Image: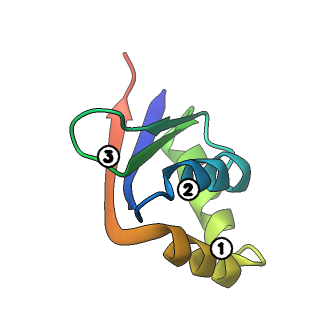
Amino acid sequence: MLVERFTFKAKPQCEEKLAAFYKEGIKAERVYISRTGLRNRVALEIEFESFEQRRKFWAAWDTRPGLAAHFQRFSELAENEIYSELWLLQ
């Protein structure tokens, strides 16, 4: 099992909105909002059974209708600071 985690820096007072945006928009398995440490952070995790499933998911995501509107809304809620990690679940 692969877990892809993205961490975003939300604009001030936009953490809840950004979390809701990704819970609905990308259907992430888990969405987190930081409460200690770095502030204004939202993380999401998406699970994949294989690298092939992950490749197909992102290929479909990159060509879906409404992608430009998605990134427009994202830019209203988040700073341009994104971290991506791919984990192998043991």
Q: Position of residue 78 (x, y in %)?
A: 45, 67
Which amino acid type is marked by label 1? Answer: His
Query: Which residue: 66% across, 45% down?
Result: 23
Q: Dot 1, crowdedness within 10 Å: few (<14), some or many (≥20)?
A: few
Asked if residue 22 lies left or right of residue 37, the reply is: right
Q: Which of marks 2 and 3 is in front?
A: 2
Q: Nearer the viewer, residue 12 or 77?
A: 12
Residue under circle 1? 70
Q: Can the viewer see residue 22?
A: yes
C-alpha gap between disc 1 and disc 3: 21 Å
Identify the element where label 2 is drawn.
Answer: helix
Residue under circle 3? 85
Q: Can the viewer see residue 6?
A: no
Please state, as top left, top right, bottom left or bottom right, where the C terminus lies in the image.
top left
C-alpha gap between disc 2 and disc 1: 12 Å
Identify the element where label 3 is drawn.
Answer: strand
Q: Where is residue 66 in the image (x, y as percent from the top left)?
A: 75, 78
Residue under circle 2? 18
Query: Which residue: 74% across, 73% down?
Result: 64
Q: Earlier in the sequence, mark 2 or mark 1?
A: 2
- The outermost residue toward the front is 13
The picture quadrant where one finds residue 35 is top left
